[in-house]
Image: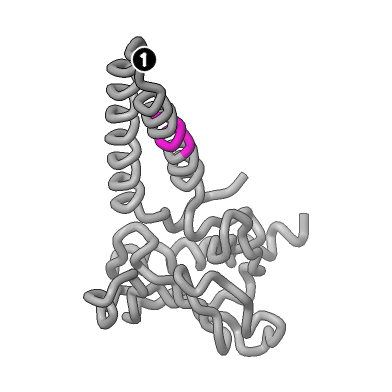
């Protein structure tokens, strides 16, 4: 069973859910209005909007269940490349830090927009974990640092970083006990 350490961005998901609801209402209204009329275009438009809204809603619901970071008792689960986590051994995670970096939002007006980042420092001795391919919009993984963009996480602040470091310390303290069992 996984323990969620860092949630996905609820603001983005709420905005997407609201948009899906609008499409659902418009599609349902169009379908009701044109169902009995001699307008196959209206029916097709209503069905298309409803179908898109339902599929979008299912996708949003699935994304809501995916955190950015979780812990499974032995590994830090980093969801930085889609729906399958990268399982990082918890003993090589040294600490969590707060940083700042590009938001990588679409559009010219956001070209210089920055966001708060969560930096995960991994042990330099674990060379096999120094680099990993990730979705560049979500994170960067280079030189034993995983940098997660705050654009795609719950709001980041010092309290969140402190909580993550406390959980890391607790998890690492339990490791020798788990290995002995």
Mark 1 sits on what residue? 35
Q: Quadrant of residue 111?
A: bottom left
Toward the front, the furthest residue is: 38
Q: Is residue 157 left or right of residue 172?
A: left
Please rate how many residues cluster around mark 1, counting C-alpha atoms within 10 Å: few if below 14, some from 14 to 19, many from 20. some
Left or right, 18 with reference to 5? left
- Towards the viewer: 60 or 5: 60
Observer-nearest residue: 169 or 82? Answer: 82
Q: Residue at x 60, y 84 (%)?
A: 123
Asked whether residue 95 appears in the rendered view, the answer is no
Along the horizontal axis of the image, is 44 left or right of 132?
left
Q: Is residue 86 above or below residue 15?
A: below
In this rendering, the answer to whether 11 lies above or below 42 is: below
Element assignment for label 1: loop
Q: Is residue 90 among the parts visible in the rendering?
A: yes
Q: What residue range appears in magenta?
A: 50-55
Residue 2, position as x, y percentages in the image: 58, 48
Name the chief secondary structure element in magenta: helix
């Amino acid at each position: 069973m996984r323990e969620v350490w860092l949630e996905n961005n609820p603001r983005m998901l709420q905005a997407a859910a609201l948009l899906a609801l609008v499409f659902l209402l418009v599609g349902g209204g169009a379908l009701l209005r044109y169902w009995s009329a001699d307008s196959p275009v209206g029916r097709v438009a209503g069905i298309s909007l409803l179908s898109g809204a339902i599929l979008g809603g299912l996708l949003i619901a699935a994304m809501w269940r995916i955190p950015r970071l979780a812990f499974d008792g032995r590994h830090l689960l980093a969801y930085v490349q889609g729906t399958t986590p990268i399982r990082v051994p918890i003993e090589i995670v040294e600490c969590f830090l707060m940083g700042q970096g590009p938001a990588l939002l679409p559009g010219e007006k956001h070209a210089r927009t920055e966001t708060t980042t969560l930096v995960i420092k991994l042990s330099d001795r674990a060379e096999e974990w120094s680099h990993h391919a990730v979705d560049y919009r979500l994170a960067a993984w280079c030189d034993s640092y995983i940098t997660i963009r705050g654009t795609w996480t719950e709001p980041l602040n010092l309290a969140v970083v402190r909580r993550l470091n406390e959980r890391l310390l607790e998890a690492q303290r339990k490791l020798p006990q788990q290995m002995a069992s």
